[in-house]
C-alpha cells in the first residue's frame, strides 16, 4: 500500500566464502497480509552475515508506526540477534511485542538435531503473566513454569481475537484468576 516496499542487498566474497545480506522492510501494512491485524505500517531491518566456517550472525529490528486508532491485533515490535551454525541456534535479547502480548528472552539455545532447548522466557498477555526456565530435549529435561492468571475472562476474550479459527476455546467461557 502506498510507499510500502522490501529492499534486499547482499555481498559474497568468493575467496573466503563469506556472505552478507540485509533486507529492509519499509511501511508494510500487516492488514494487507491478514485482515484481523492492525494497519499500522511496519518498518525494519534483517541483517545476516556468514564467516569462513559458515556461522551465521543475524540481527532483526522491526517497529510499527504509531497508530492513531487500533482496529485490530497490532504488531508493535520485534528484536533479536544471534548466531546459527547447524545444528545450533542461539538467540540473544529476543523481544516480541505483538497481538497484545510480549515475549522476552535474554538467551535461548536450540539444537535442531537433538531438539534440545535451553533458556528462559517471560511472557505477558491480556490476563496472564508467565515465566519459563527450561533445559531439555525430546527424551528428557527439566524446567520450571510459573503462570499467574490475573483475569481468565480477559485471557479468553484475547484468545478469541487471535487468528486461530472461529472459536479456539470451543465455546468455553473463562472466569476467575489463579
Image: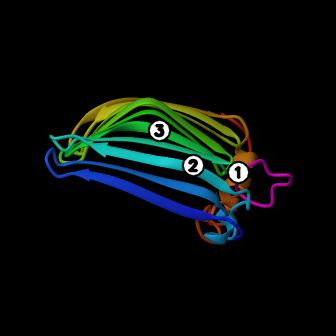
**Residue 48 location, x and y as percent?**
36, 46
Q: In front: mark 2 or mark 3? A: 2
Q: Quadrant of the N terminus?
A: bottom right
Label placed on residue 44: 2
Magenta-drawn segment: 65-74
Q: Which quarter of the figure has residue 172?
A: bottom right
Q: Which residue is mark 1?
A: 174
Task: Identify the residue shown where x is 73% and y is 60%.
Answer: 38
**Residue 88 location, x and y as percent?**
23, 40
- Residue 97 in sight here: no
Q: In front: mark 2 or mark 1? A: 2
SS of the residue under disc 2: strand
Sooner in the amino-acid sequence: mark 1 or mark 3: 3
Sort mark 1 into few (<14), some (14-19) or many (20+) by Cα contacts within 10 Å.
Answer: some
**Magenta-drawn stretch, dominant element (helix, strand or loop):** loop
- Residue 16 in sight here: yes
Whole-Å distance between the Cαs marked 2 and 3? 12 Å
SS of the residue under disc 1: loop
Q: Are marks 1 and 3 in contact (CB under 8 Å)?
A: no
**Residue 31 location, x and y as percent?**
68, 67
Amino acid at each position: 500500500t502506498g510507499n510500502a516496499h522490501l529492499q534486499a542487498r547482499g555481498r559474497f566474497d568468493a575467496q573466503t566464502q563469506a556472505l552478507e545480506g540485509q533486507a529492509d522492510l519499509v511501511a508494510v501494512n500487516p492488514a494487507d497480509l491478514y485482515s484481523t491485524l492492525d494497519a499500522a505500517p511496519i518498518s525494519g531491518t534483517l541483517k545476516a552475515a556468514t564467516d569462513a566456517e559458515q556461522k551465521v550472525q543475524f540481527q532483526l529490528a522491526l517497529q510499527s508506526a504509531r497508530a492513531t486508532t487500533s482496529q485490530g491485533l497490532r504488531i508493535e515490535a520485534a528484536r533479536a540477534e544471534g548466531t546459527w551454525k547447524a545444528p545450533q541456534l542461539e538467540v540473544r535479547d529476543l523481544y516480541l511485542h505483538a497481538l497484545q502480548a510480549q515475549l522476552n528472552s535474554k538467551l535461548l539455545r536450540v539444537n535442531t538435531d537433538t531438539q534440545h532447548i535451553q533458556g528462559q522466557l517471560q511472557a505477558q498477555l491480556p490476563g496472564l503473566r508467565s515465566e519459563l526456565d527450561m533445559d531439555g530435549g525430546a527424551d528428557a529435561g527439566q524446567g520450571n513454569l510459573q503462570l499467574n492468571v490475573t483475569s481468565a475472562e480477559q485471557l479468553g476474550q484475547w484468545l478469541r481475537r487471535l487468528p486461530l479459527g472461529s472459536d479456539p476455546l470451543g465455546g468455553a467461557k473463562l472466569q476467575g484468576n489463579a
